[in-house]
């Protein structure tokens, strides 16, 4: 009898002590997926903060609402201040656990104090998702978010911007950057890129803004960002279009490998980067002259592709050296593998980085030629 | 009465597997979540060196304790103490009581703080604290063999916890961050060892278990096995954290392991923000630390006041632990001030007292008093 009572008690426990952990059902929360910061020109609050969040009533088979996503703007000093102000306007509280995207307008990004505050808030808060992806917009964040609502591709529940950013198609024209990685880059190299978002009929994420000391200092064109992705070996798939003699060659790169090395040099620091990319031929030409079946032709094709890549890379390296932004992580490399030299140069690394020699050696290996010769 | 107690004690048996499990579950506690922070502050990416050295240094510590019990076979901690210190044993008992109560309070308060911020945001801290202490009563009022069985039960959970953390760390890990190796000086290694030593404290509680272990000859082997397990877990977790964050970030983050678990972002929304899972496993780990400490504290007290069964003190200590745990006003007082006292008391209880006991014991044997 006693045993049965205990058993009953244990079973009751299972039923009575489970449920939603803080007595708030999921449909009583608002999960903003994007937050945008603009400076507030008038008034005492510093920012115009815009949230966009999915409309739960528009989901599921019994949807009663048409709009999939709502946007709401308020004046506040921080994201958390904005949340408190929203309580008087919204039926449920905002909950930042699933925040995905942070959009900074150009002016906010140029202000070191603001960027440090905003990033700190996301990093410090117990609840806020640390994997928030950062974006910079030349348009004001409020306009951008409101434009996104009308975008034709507004289908994804988690938000159009985020679904572009998670980069399922492996675009090489930008490099997604989340808050933790951003801080990491700042700690390691004092510089980081952040993808640039723009609206021109449609949402477009390409190119990037260059941050140094938590402050926007310049931009990289999409082609430059692509070259940077090559240098940092951060691409999985990309196609290379090049010309060989009078034929057009389309190559699919499926992998890239980078090796950085410090070359012995008397007068200047010289960093050598060896890039080895491999891929296969996507499209060439049916001309009999160009049958791909001897090693010699293959070598020439490989060299042509490598040359194509190297041009962009050299330009990009020159540009980031002028910006004094160590986006290729040469400093962290020295710190890890040549600590003695790093101790000497650490103090004025920014200046030294501008003047070091960086030599990039690109090699392309064509492993497969498709199903025809 | 003596006879009766002796007889009761004779029935208690701990197997070697249970001893290993118990040591691991006592030692691994709060520190597994946050020791990476102070360690990285002192030694940067080389912190694992201090963990390994501390692990090695713990072995002579347990050898000291083993030696004392070898000199007095078939006697438990209290009988040995009485034989060696005579009437002065009361001082040692008081120091031990202070130390054990403080650990219990420290552990309970840490748990309550974390549960509050991560899970139960609207529940008052006091309620979480008192619930946790109350849930430890049941197990702590049993004898050590039951607790050892529970410790053995928690052993795989701790291993699972570490494996989960390491797996979480793998996808984004950059193992080059461990470089450059060995660029550190003696001063920072010593400070690093000090941090680690604190996280190895609790190993001294074996004084309450050793007399009951089945095969006395194999004790040392089991202890070394347990210490290696702990060292391995600490090192692996430290390396996983270093491979995922920059050193500057680690020195900023209070609980690097939690932040690491929140980094998980597998495509397809399959797994995201694993802090809930880590939290759940960690609560069990803390329970495994709290219960043996609680048990030992009430055992010492019951011996001090000559009460036959320690369960009375288990219940009596609830308000004491609660009050001590509520003493720090903020997190700085909790981690820095309270941590400092614990460090000194730990040094006294786990290193100085065993050495003193051994020296006095040897002297007494030689002189023959």
Image: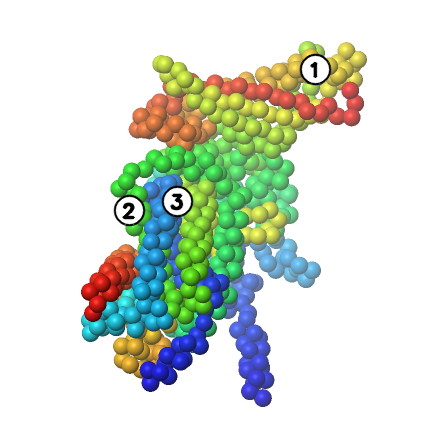
Q: Quadrant of residue B221?
A: bottom left
Cβ–Cβ below 8 Å for labels 2 and 1?
no
Horizontally, residue A145 falls left or right of residue A268, namely right
Position of residue B254 measured from the top left corner of the image (x, y, whole percent): 37, 52
Position of residue B135 measured from the top left corner of the image (x, y, whole percent): 43, 73
Q: Quadrant of residue A293?
A: top right
Are marks 2 and 1 in one subunit? no
| Residue position for label 1 | A295
Mark 3 vs 2, N-terminal side: 3
Relative vertical location of residue A42 with respect to residue A204 in this rendering, above or below:
below
Separation of disc 3 and disc 2 at Cα? 13 Å
- Which element is circle 2 on? helix
Relative vertical location of residue A16 with respect to residue A43 in this rendering, above or below:
below
Separation of disc 3 and disc 1 at Cα? 50 Å
Closest to the observer: B108 or A253? B108
| Residue position for label 3 | B48
């Amino acid at each position: 009898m006693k045993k049965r009572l205990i058993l009953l008690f244990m079973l009751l426990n299972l039923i009575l002590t489970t449920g939603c952990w803080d007595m708030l059902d999921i449909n009583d929360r608002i999960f903003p997926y994007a937050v945008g910061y603009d400076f507030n020109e008038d008034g005492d609050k510093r920012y115009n903060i815009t949230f966009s969040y999915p409309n739960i009533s528009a989901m599921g088979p019994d949807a009663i609402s048409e709009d999939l996503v709502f946007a709401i703007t308020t004046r506040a000093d921080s994201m958390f201040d904005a949340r408190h102000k929203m309580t008087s306007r919204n039926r449920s509280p905002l909950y930042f656990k699933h925040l995905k995207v942070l959009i900074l307008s150009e002016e906010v990004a140029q202000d070191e104090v603001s960027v440090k505050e905003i990033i700190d808030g996301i990093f410090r808060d117990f609840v806020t998702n640390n994997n928030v992806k950062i974006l910079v917009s030349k348009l004001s964040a409020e306009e951008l978010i409101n434009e996104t609502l009308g975008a034709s591709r507004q289908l994804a529940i988690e938000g159009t911007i985020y679904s572009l950013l998670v980069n399922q198609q492996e675009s090489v024209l930008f490099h997604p950057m989340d808050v933790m990685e951003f801080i990491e880059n700042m700690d390691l190299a004092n510089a980081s890129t952040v993808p640039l978002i723009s609206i021109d009929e449609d949402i477009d994420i390409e190119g990037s803004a260059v941050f140094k000391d938590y402050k926007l200092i310049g931009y990289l064109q999409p082609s430059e960002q692509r070259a940077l992705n090559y240098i940092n070996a951060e691409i999985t798939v990309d196609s290379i279009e090049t010309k060989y003699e009078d034929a057009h060659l389309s190559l699919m790169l499926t992998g890239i490998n980078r090796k950085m090395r410090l070359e012995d040099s008397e007068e200047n620091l010289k960093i050598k980067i060896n890039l080895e990319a491999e891929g296969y031929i996507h499209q060439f030409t049916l001309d009999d002259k160009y049958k791909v079946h001897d090693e010699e032709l293959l070598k020439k094709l490989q060299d042509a592709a490598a040359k194509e890549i190297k041009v962009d890379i050299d330009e990009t390296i020159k540009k980031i050296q002028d910006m004094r932004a160590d986006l290729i992580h040469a400093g962290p490399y020295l710190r890890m593998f040549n600590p003695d030299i790093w101790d000497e140069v650490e103090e004025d690394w920014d200046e030294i980085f501008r003047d070091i020699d960086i030599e990039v050696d690109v090699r392309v290996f064509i492993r497969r030629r498709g199903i025809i010769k | 009465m003596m006879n009766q107690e002796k007889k009761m004690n004779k029935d208690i048996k701990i197997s070697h597997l249970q001893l290993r499990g118990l040591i691991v579950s006592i030692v691994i506690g709060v520190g597994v979540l946050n020791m990476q922070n102070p360690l990285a502050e002192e030694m940067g990416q080389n912190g694992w060196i201090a963990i390994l050295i501390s692990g090695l240094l713990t072995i002579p510590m347990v050898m000291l304790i083993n030696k004392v019990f070898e000199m007095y076979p078939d006697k438990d901690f209290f009988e040995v103490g009485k034989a060696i210190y005579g009437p002065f044993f009361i001082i040692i008992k008081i120091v031990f009581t202070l130390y054990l109560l403080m650990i219990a309070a420290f552990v309970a308060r840490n748990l309550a703080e974390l549960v509050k911020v991560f899970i139960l945001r609207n529940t008052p801290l006091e309620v979480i604290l008192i619930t946790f202490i109350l849930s430890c009563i049941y197990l702590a009022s049993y004898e050590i063999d039951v607790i050892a069985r529970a410790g053995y039960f928690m052993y795989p959970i701790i291993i699972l916890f570490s494996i989960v953390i390491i797996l979480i760390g793998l996808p984004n890990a950059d193992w080059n961050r461990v470089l450059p190796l060995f660029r550190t000086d003696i001063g920072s290694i010593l400070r690093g060892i000090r941090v680690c030593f604190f996280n190895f404290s609790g190993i001294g509680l074996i004084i309450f278990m050793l007399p009951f272990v089945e095969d006395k000859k194999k004790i040392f082997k089991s202890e070394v096995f347990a210490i290696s397990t702990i060292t391995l877990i600490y090192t692996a977790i430290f390396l996983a954290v270093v491979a995922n964050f920059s050193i500057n970030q680690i020195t900023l983050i209070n609980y690097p392991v939690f932040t690491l678990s929140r980094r998980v972002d597998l495509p397809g929304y399959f797994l995201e923000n694993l802090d809930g899972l880590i939290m759940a496993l960690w609560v069990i780990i803390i329970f495994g630390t709290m219960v043996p400490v609680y048990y030992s504290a009430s055992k010492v007290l019951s011996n001090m006041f000559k009460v036959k069964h320690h369960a009375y003190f288990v219940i009596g200590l609830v308000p004491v632990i609660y009050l001590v745990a509520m003493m720090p006003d903020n997190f700085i007082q909790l981690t820095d001030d309270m941590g400092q006292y614990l460090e000194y008391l730990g040094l006294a209880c786990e290193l100085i007292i065993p050495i003193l006991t051994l020296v006095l014991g040897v002297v007494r044997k030689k002189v023959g008093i």
